[in-house]
Amino acid sequence: MKVLASDFDNTLFTEDYDENIKKINEFVNKGNIFIIATGRNLGLLKPEIESKNLNYDYLICNDGGIIFDKNLNILYRLDIEEEIIDDLVLELKNDPNITVTYIDDGINHLTHKTVNNNVINARYINPKQAQETLDKLMEKYSNIQGYLSHNWINIVNKKANKGNAIKYLKEKLNLNKQNIYTVGDNINDISMNEMYNGYYMKDNSKPELIEVSKAAVNSVKELINLIEAEKNDI
């Protein structure tokens, strides 16, 4: 049995989306496991996968902050510590470079604190200033981490990342690490590519991800073909 964890945007969700899905469904029907590992929350991911009848086993959302099974039951979550939420949000709201701040509970973006504060997303104007803000926050609050995506600061629990989320599933399901493959394009994919058999998208990947990955692929479909050709099952 092989396991593939794929990033969504610009990795699985590309102009090859339909062909990727067809290959994924064949892969899963052969008894393999397919996982989507994305920075999106469930609310933003569901419409794109349900409309296409994509056969997945697990969804790792919010960059590893929360895991759902195929029936959308929550298996695991790692939230930002509640006692620092108010201070974090206040600092972001008072920053003139930030236009809006959301708290994400893993399913929806909210404008207020909730019981489960999985991610903080803050929309920025100037990326250099946003990085400075994020660096200051991470220095001040040692139990968070974050990164900049297009127009957004993303803040999560320091232990939350895609690699650790896959590790949770590996231990829960007693998976063979040698049979776990990952693929992505951005810096939030580094953790999983460092820990497992990591591949990167050929045309659009960040240099930091390329450095920790085995090789490039043009599509998820191509990677599945490579995986199926290997003979390392135990």
Image (cartoon, grey):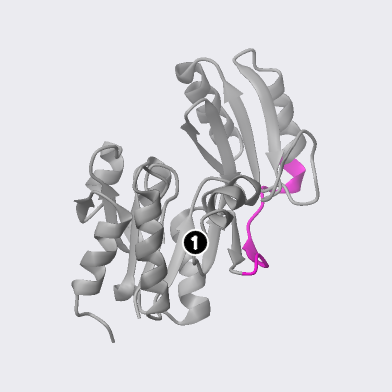
Outermost residue to the top: 96
- The amino acid type found where label 1 is placed reads Leu
For the point 62% across and 28% down, the residue is 122
Q: Quadrant of residue 207?
A: top left
Rendered view: 5 above or below 31: above
The crowding category of the residue bearing disc 1, from other C-alpha atoms within 10 Å (few below 14, some 14 to 19, many at least 20), is some
For the point 71% across and 31% down, the residue is 89
Image coordinates for residue 180, horizontal then vertical, percent: 34, 70
Magenta residues (range): 71-84
Name the residue nearer the viewer: 22 or 135. Answer: 22
The stretch drawn in magenta includes residue 75: yes
Q: Quadrant of the N terminus?
A: bottom left
For the point 60% across and 25% down, the residue is 123
Image coordinates for residue 42, horizontal then vertical, percent: 63, 51
Q: Quadrant of the C terminus?
A: bottom left
Q: Which residue position is annotated with label 1?
A: 54
The stretch drawn in magenta includes residue 88: no
Image coordinates for residue 113, horizontal then vertical, percent: 79, 40
Q: Quadrant of residue 137?
A: top right
